[in-house]
Amino acid sequence: MRPLIRLIPLTLLLVLTGCAGKKHLSRQMGGFETIPAVTSFRQPIKAVASDVFSGHFKPIYDKKTQGSVDNLMLTGNRYVAFKTTRRRFLVLDQETGKRLCKIQRRRGYIFGPVIDDTLLVMVDKSPWGRIEVINLFTGKAIARRIEFGIKTEPFHIDGNLVFGTNRGLQSLTFPGLQPRWSDTCEAPVNILPAHDQATIYAVSGARQVRAVDAETGAGRWSIDLPADVVSEIGLGRYLYLGLADGRLIALNRTDGSAVWEYTIGYLVRGGLVEEGDGLFFGCTDGRVYGLNAADASLRWAFQTGGVVVATPTVFGSAVVVGSLDRYLYSIHGVSGKLIDKVRLNGPITAPVAAGGLRIFAATRNNRIYCFEGR
């Protein structure tokens, strides 16, 4: 008993110095987990062009996750963050894969982006739509709100949160979560809207595409399409949409008028990414396509071994995308020729995250991979 009693003051001293020094305590499920101090969280980096990246994959490490990873984000201070289907949000060190932070909840969430320096937004997938703004240092919610009928994850624009509901778009202040504006569409917004700093572009119902003012929610224009929208919204010089009849359509961002159409005959389920003068996307026919964004003329079509539902990531001169055939592909953006491919442990349905010379990919079989671009 005497050695045990002597250890108690030492344990208390270590805990106290950890809190005051380089450690923080993160509350989760009624317990505490010690994590290294995080100096700053910034907006996620979707892709960073790098001429140094030749398109080849060099494996660095891989980690098993409890649940499939829904999406991956890179932060400006060398962390990789993601949510899993087991109701966990985790932050790893990009270089080592060491876990820095874990936040866990009893109920499922649609995952929103890491916003501001230290705050995370998570949305309950239940019909009640509980929104939480969570401090990443402590794991505690600093603001909560109930919004019924939330249909999409929120996104951050000009100091506010916007998300789709079963009655249109809703805007809240951030981080206070007070009502700001809601539109009068009276139709569900099921697809994550796209936006620039002044305008939000949304699909209402299944076929109506609308542009609204980001500051007030006032409508600017709307157009009804001939078929349901089945893809994510691509945003570049035009709005890009994949339709249920196997066509792609590009719309003028100013008035919604059609610029061009391109018939594939198959569906685009992921996103359409414009980079330079090219437009890149995957398709249910198992191909990855490269078009000229200005006129939809075909550059190339690369055949994979499975359906492609992930959104491509353009990294340097390479288009990096995963397929349901379990391979991660690197394709030359100009020629469409294969640069490299690597087989992972399961189907790949989410876009990769790329920054610096690191590439992160996740599979539906509960694993995350880190590669160095050579």
Image: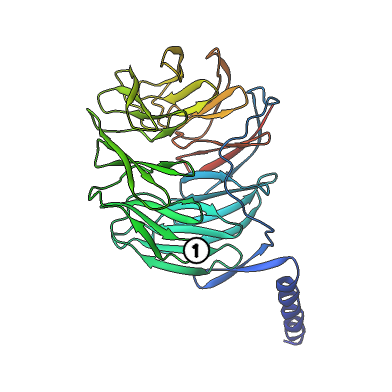
Q: Amino acid at mark 1?
A: Pro
The C terminus, quarter of image: top right
Placement of 127 over or under 57, stated as above or below? below
> In front here: 98 or 205?
205
Left or right: 207, with 19 as reference point: left
Q: Is residue 178 above or below residue 191?
A: below
Residue toward you, 148 or 87: 148
Mark count: 1
Image location of residue 151, percent across then percent down: 32, 50
Q: Left or right: where does residue 151 sit relative to residue 276?
A: left
Tell me what residue is drawn at x 40 percent, y 50 percent: 153
Residue at 47% x, 35% y: name it.
Answer: 346
**Pick the front one: 181 or 318:** 181
Q: Which residue is mark 1?
A: 175
Residue 44: image x %, image y %? 57, 46
Which element type, helix, strand or loop, lies under badge 1? loop
Residue 19, image x, y percentages: 70, 72
Asked whether residue 66 is in view, the answer is: no
Query: Residue 355's quadrant in the figure?
Result: top right
Disc 1: CA contacts within 10 A as few (<14), some (14-19) or many (>=20): many
Q: Which corner quadrant of the image does residue 108 belong to?
A: bottom left
Say if residue 371 shows up in the picture. yes
Q: Where does the image place residue 87, in percent across and percent down from the top left?
A: 44, 57
